[in-house]
Amino acid sequence: MTAFLDALGALHLLRPWILLLLPVVGLIWWRVRRRYTASVAPPKGIVPHLAEALTVGADEGRRLHAIDLVALVLALVTLAAAGPTWSRVANPLLAQTAPLVVVLKVDESMLAPDVPPSRLERARFKIAELVERRAGARTALIAYAGSAHRVAPLTEDPNLMKAMLEALTPEVMPVEGDAPGAALELATEELAASETPGAILFVLDALNAADAAAFVSTGTDGGPPVLFLQVAPEGAPAGPLAEMPSERVIRISADDADLRRIERAAASAYRAALLGDERLDWDDRGWIVAWLAVPVLLLWFRRGWTMRWSVLLALGLAAGAPAPARAGVADWFLTPDQQGAIAYRQKEFARAGELFLDPMWRAHALARAGKYAEAAEIYSRLDTAEAAFGEGMARTRNREYRPAIAAYERALEMQPEFPEAEWNLALTRDILDYVETAREQGDTGEERGIGADDVVFDNEDERGAETDTDFSETEETPSMETADQWMRSVDTQMGDFLRQRFLQEQSTRDRE
């Protein structure tokens, strides 16, 4: 019902001047129907009740006539031609739903076991489930305690989000405390850098009373709406959260009722954001109104209403119609891109990637299907900043960090004001630096504390004999790891990576 009311309030006509035909349709209907409803003078010399019974067609004024259906069809077709719409066409590189910034409280109070297994564990489980349900939507993650830090930028990759989410514990936070105000400021900045405004979700057990005033006017002063998912046992006092509007505070539940409320609020924010973005084209929905005329047209063949020339016209259109180039009934009515769009909305991304002819949509669908190498190949052939950005995202997910950095740099060359590309470039550089550092430490043994104090090369004068020594593998000798095993070991060190990054960020803030 909420979506219907939002659509009704946003109703817009692309070609309103076509509605001038409605009075013409009404005039034709009135002129024709008047013939059926014109009163007939009663015959003389017969009493009125007998004259009414003997008059043929006396009840014509109460019957439905063919002109009524014709006028209805013409009116519906006119409305369809006027181009009614209530939404805009979204950019394929942007989310199909509202961007959402999830802010997680990570302090000692979240370790309480009154919401088993603990408040923090339950919160992380809910966030992971929410990200999984929002497949295709961009979600960012921010953690806060005494300071706030960006864990992951707005991304559509749930695997990246989950890996960092599991590493969040109070130990990785550089400052103890409870500073939701700093987290709100950081989340607002994250959404401001996005082309499509969205919503902010705080996942916490309680709101610090000292910062509660900063949340009272959020969502009503033009800023993004802020929701609260309270992770606390049933009956726990709401505290400052009781001062917030009831529709913004959601108590965590054992089922997915809380997640459904969050999704509805985020979707409402996305619809409002699209309507206000003048850069996007309106999505013409006239075809929906045109289909409403089809059941009415079926009544045209009611006995006594069928017109002979209509049958001849239908046969002529069928004979003159060109043969379809491809087999399949869908090809008669829909273009390949339209079929791909339908498959994309149904989240059949692999099939959509095969149907799309538009290279941008095709690459985006393949990336969503997990075929990152194929998507990056298509993106690389397009000479736009959005395509270079898409190539960088595909190569990052495929762990091709150096080509991804080059793609982000190319996107910034073509469009210097591209905040998403700037952030992804910085993040990919950090990941590459961390991966190479971990690899070097693993090669030299420094990570295990057995690194050499100095490296000395003998036989500098090329004297002596070359010898081959067989080092048999023992229990003390570490075996060589495969690439997958090594990458899993890097993933397990995500906590160390976040701790070092948060410390560096906090040190920079202290110096400023």
Image (cartoon, helix red, strand yellow):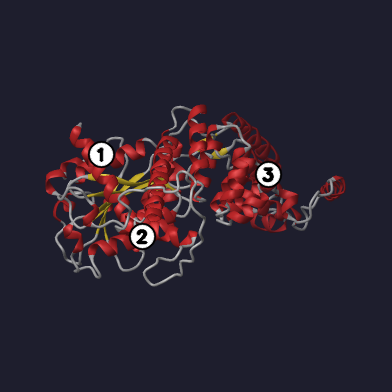
Label 3 sits on a secondary structure element that is loop
Where does residue 330 sit, x and y in percent of width and height? 71, 54
The furthest residue to the left:
210
Identify which amino acid the numbered label 1 is placed on.
Glu
Say which quarter of the image contains residue 425.
top left
Identify which amino acid the numbered label 2 is placed on.
Thr
Say which quarter of the image contains residue 505.
top left
- Distance between mark 2 and mark 1 Cα atoms: 30 Å
Q: From what the image shows, is residue 100 above or below residue 348? A: above
- Distance between mark 3 and mark 2 Cα atoms: 41 Å
Where does residue 288 sit, x and y in percent of width and height? 60, 47
| Mark earlier in primary sequence (2, 1) | 1
> Is 445 displayed left or right of 14 in the figure?
left
Q: Residues within 10 Å of mark 3 (few under 14, many from 20)?
A: some
Question: For mark 2, what is the residue?
Answer: 492
From the viewer's side, name the closer residue of 420 and 32.
420
Question: For mark 3, what is the residue?
Answer: 357
Q: Which residue is found at the position 40% from the left and 46% from the top?
A: 431
- Distance between mark 1 and mark 3 Cα atoms: 42 Å
Q: Nearer the viewer, mark 2 or mark 1?
A: 2
Label 2 sits on a secondary structure element that is helix
Q: Which mark is residue 185?
A: 1
Q: CB of mark 3 within 8 Å of CB of mark 2?
A: no
Q: Residues within 10 Å of mark 1 (few under 14, many from 20)?
A: few
Is residue 263 visible in the rendered image? The answer is no
The furthest residue to the front:
463
| Mark earlier in primary sequence (3, 2) | 3
